[in-house]
Image: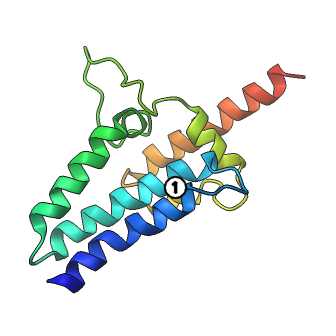
């Protein structure tokens, strides 16, 4: 039981260490880290034998805390009359990951649960916003 709990919590310890960097910018790792944690929790839901409740609670808390990001990245659907959640809903975060050479858009191919069409549309949107920012500032 303890080993399973360690397996569940280990990625959170790694994510915490990664996002607490003092000597390097961390905004570019937010999207890859959150999406990887989400993907991991989805897989642990099926594998967990003793701590399924813990996994589900962590997954719900992650989705609630980063709801705007999940909405923006089309992982959580946005209802017709529902506004985009402002928490982490800014395109700053996906664009920052694009600009970080450690991440780019790898997270989109590897961990994003969407269809290939959704992933392609998101890739085009993120690159388009970056190009608009780049061309708009020159």
Image coordinates of residue 9 in percent, x first then y, are: 31, 70
Vertical side of 115 occupied by 71: above or below: above
Residue 124 visible to the viewer: no
Q: Is residue 39 left or right of residue 1?
A: right
Image coordinates of residue 11 in percent, x first then y, are: 40, 69
> Could you say which is closer to the camera, residue 124 or residue 12?
12
What residue does disc 1 label? 32
Q: Is residue 51 left or right of residue 4?
A: left
Quadrant in which the N terminus is drawn: bottom left
Label 1: few (<14), some (14–19) or many (≥20) C-alpha neighbours in 10 Å: many
Residue at the spot 19% in from the left edge and 63% down from the top edge = 55
Image coloring type = rainbow
Residue at the spot 10% in from the left edge and 62% down from the top edge = 53
The extreme top residue here reads 81
Vertical side of 37 occupied by 86: above or below: above
Image coordinates of residue 128 in percent, x first then y, are: 67, 32
Image coordinates of residue 7 in percent, x first then y, are: 29, 78
> Could you say which is closer to the camera, residue 94 or residue 24?
24
Residue at the spot 72% in from the left edge and 47% down from the top edge = 99
Q: How many marks?
A: 1
Residue at the spot 23% in from the left edge and 85% down from the top edge = 3
Vertical side of 79 occupied by 96: above or below: below
Res. 132 image quadrant: top right
Quadrant in which the C terminus is drawn: top right
Vertical side of 115 occupied by 44: above or below: below
Res. 79 image quadrant: top left
Residue 137 visible to the viewer: yes
């Amino acid at each position: 039981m303890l080993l399973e709990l360690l397996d569940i919590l280990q990625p959170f310890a790694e994510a915490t260490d990664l996002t607490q960097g003092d000597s390097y910018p961390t905004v570019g790792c937010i999207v890859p880290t959150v999406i990887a944690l989400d993907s991991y929790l989805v897989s642990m839901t099926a594998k967990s034998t003793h701590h399924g409740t813990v996994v589900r609670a962590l997954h719900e808390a992650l989705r609630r805390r980063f709801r705007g990001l999940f909405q923006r990245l089309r992982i959580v659907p946005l209802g017709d009359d529902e506004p985009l959640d402002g928490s982490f809903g800014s395109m700053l975060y996906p664009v920052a990951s694009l600009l970080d050479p450690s991440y780019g858009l790898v997270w989109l191919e590897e961990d994003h649960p969407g269809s290939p069409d959704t992933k392609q549309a998101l890739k085009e949107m993120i690159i388009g916003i970056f190009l608009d920012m780049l061309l708009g500032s020159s």
